[in-house]
Image: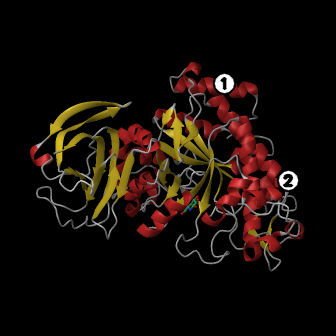
Amino acid sequence: MTPLRLAPLASILAVILLATTAGLRAEDAGEIPHFAQKDGRHAFIVDGEPFFLLGGQCGNSSAWPSELPGVWSAVERMHANTLEAPVYWEQFEPQEGRYDTSIVDLMVRQAREHHVRLVLLWFGTWKNGSAHYLPLWIKDHPELYPKCIGKTGLPVDTPSPHFPAMLAADTRAFRALMRHLKAIDPIHTVIMVQVENESGAWGTIRDYSPAAQAVFAQPVPSELLKALGLDSKSGGDWTAVFGADADEYFHAWFVARFVGQVAAAGKEEYALPMYANAALRDPLSPGPAGTYESGGPTDNVLSIWKAAAPALDVLAPDIYQNDNARYRRVLELYSRPDNPLLVPETGGSPWYAHMVFAALGKGALGWSPFGINHATDPDADRGAKPDADRLSPVGTNFRIIGPVMREVARLEYEGKLLALAEDADVHRQTGELAGWKVAVTYGVARFGFGKDPKGNPEPVGGAIVGSTGPDEFLVTGRSCRVDFQPLESEPKAQREFLRVEEGDYENGVFTPLRIWNGDETDYGLNFGTAPVALRVRVRRY
Ligand code: DGJ
């Protein structure tokens, strides 16, 4: 690949080429994707409307022309609407100041051909805490771009956030990326950018180099104290103010400042939504600092990150905890009025698939399994179809949610959505929506009242119910039964299905295909693995 210099002519040619490939004209350019907020709820606005990102992230070494056919095959099989794919600094800037945009251009073009959006992941200074994606011309100069020094005095395999040369180099490259995206992507195929990847440190809580020690002895910045509601004039150093947490909070502040400055510079070029992802600590029993990645946006330092990096729209959890309690706790911890919930990475094994319903239930704006093109058969990574497709459970759910994605995202933003995921130990779940009790049961026979639900053999089920008008609901789900009941406060009232229609939702308009009645409604509304969207009208009698 020949590195291209980012010159206006090259950019203009790239725009013409990419736009022509996609059959698009410059005037098709729409509103830039962004986050919106109302009443403590959030929306991810894409093409002017709330959007739910049904995503898939490819493997780390898969954003290469040789691997992309296998990636697109996975995207198709899982019915994703968005591919998350890395941009490698070492590939993007192979020589200082010379940028190779060929792979970015290819991914944008191919995403358009596949009718999906892109989230690009900037593998810059940090990748899982390491500095492995730095270009060789940086790796060759450790004196300018140093690693952290651990407590023992030995270097640790993680970049230090305290050296301006690294910040300047990363910022310049990221600016170039964003400038290029702005030039080639007027129709916003790229809808969001991740800044760095799981930044922070493994193997040390912070940098103990002489340079970092000097900063550590200085007073805590007053803006941080103010943001945390502490005495901003205290003048105390990190140990005086934060005691046992000082090392970790210090690292979090400086890593976040660094990442926030990279994001802010990128936004000056092109203000797409940006987020930083976190390698989590255990949400129920975290253990001491040093037992998890230190300095990244873990749940205990979210407020530090918010204060240090206001250019980041979201601090997002990578959830690899495959048990109910932990998964749901993480969703709670990262869903805050000041932080939209986004799950940019989660496990790709079948268990995780139903957690997309749990994420929606907590107001998430997107959900994306990792390593979608990985398969046990190495040839499957290159586009061959694996025997047992481990993406199929996610694909089933994305096929169910995909057709109603816009309605679901809008109702979620308006606070009119209930979404529930099966829990292996709980076979009947209830929630309240628009004056009705919604009951969801798992593992009931199609015929019969299903008083004693057994649960599905594996917890795969999930349900989505949205309030679309007085006593009217959009209902869909996977391997479950949904029913409506009057509230506890109305013991004498009973539910009647006035009309249940199966059909298609598009732009808020419902087109019915058939009416459900008889066996299809007498015991409740049963969902299997097929995509079924219902408009349900109920009343009390
Ligand atoms: C989390 C990282 O963010 C990904 O890039 C990848 O390394 C996965 N872990 C692997 O499980």
Residue, x 34% and y 45% (percent of image)?
434
Crowding around mark 2 (Cα neighbors within 10 Å: few <14, some 14 to 19, many 20+) is: few
Q: Earlier in the sequence, mark 1 or mark 2?
A: 1
Tag count in the figure? 2
Residue closer to the observer: 129 or 372: 129
Q: Which residue is mark 2?
A: 165
Tag on residue 13?
1
The quadrant of the rendering that contains the C terminus is top left
Residue closer to the observer: 448 or 138: 448
SS assignment at label 2: helix
Relative to 417, is 441 on the left or the right?
Answer: left
Residue, x 38% and y 42% (percent of image)?
402
Disc 1 vs disc 2: which is toward the camera? 2
Relative to 423, is 140 on the left or the right?
Answer: right
- Give the residue furthest to the left: 518
The quadrant of the rendering that contains the N terminus is top right
Residue closer to the observer: 247 or 473: 473
Residue 3 position within the rendered picture, expressed as x and y whole percent measured from the top left: 72, 39
View quadrant of ligand 1: bottom right
